[in-house]
Amino acid sequence: MNSETVKQLAVRFTRARHNLLLVVAFTTINLVLRVVGSDVFFLFSATLPMFIYDRAITANTGIILGAAVIFVYLLCWIMAKQWRWFIVIALIFFLVDIGFYADFLIWNRHFLPYVFDVSFAIEIAFRLWILISLISGTIAWARLRKLSNQEFAVAQTQAEADASATEAGAALRDLAAGNDDEDEDEDDNNSYE
């Protein structure tokens, strides 16, 4: 496996971890919003904690069990840095979450009113994005299993440095293009004087 392939796989794995952290953050916010009775809901989150909270015998039990589910996602994110196979556990857990989401939509007859709703399409797109991201991270993990953590860290650092250099180059090009536009505007303004 060449170094470019290793870098690409390291980036895919890292993106999967970052997306998992976003799921943790937005799910935590959604659970807090649900507890305080708000109608606001972020799409980029897991369903299972809200499902558990809504069906719990008491609010405190729902909060504790919902937070426990979020903690499992957070634990997968933390542990995947050292033991990359935790990304597989996160994927399995998210698949279970999607199962609960599908069950909620289909068996509670909430599916048909949402078929033509734009927010429903966006919600499905975000779930697919996370699912694809976790699958991509799992595939990257499977292909990188033979690398030591140190070799993986080096590849990851190189990939992040390459990405930063690319972003810096694009920013410089944009800045240069912006300066050129300003110079042209000044020339235009001077010609009218």
Image (cartoon, grey):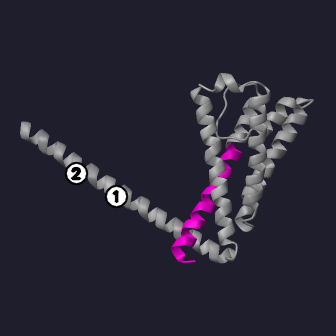
18 falls in the magenta region: yes
State which tag comes first along the sequence, 2 or 1. Answer: 1
Q: Which residues, given as a range, are shown in magenta?
A: 1-25
Element marked by disc 1:
helix
**From this viewpoint, which residue is outermost toward the top?**
113
* Residue 74 visible from this viewpoint: no
Q: Residue at x 66, y 28 (%)?
A: 40
Q: Quadrant of residue 9?
A: bottom right
Q: Quadrant of residue 124?
A: top right
Q: Quadrant of residue 47?
A: top right
Q: Left or right? Give the position of 91 relative to 173.
A: right
16 falls in the magenta region: yes
Amino acid at the residue labelled 1 = Leu
Q: Residue at x 67, y 31 (%)?
A: 41
The quarter in which the C terminus is drawn is top left
- What x and y, as percent, mark residue 134? 67, 54
Q: Which residue is mark 2?
A: 180
Q: Which residue is mark 1?
A: 172
The quarter in which the N terminus is drawn is bottom right
Q: Residue at x 17, y 46 (%)?
A: 184
Amino acid at the residue labelled 2 = Asp
Element marked by disc 2:
helix
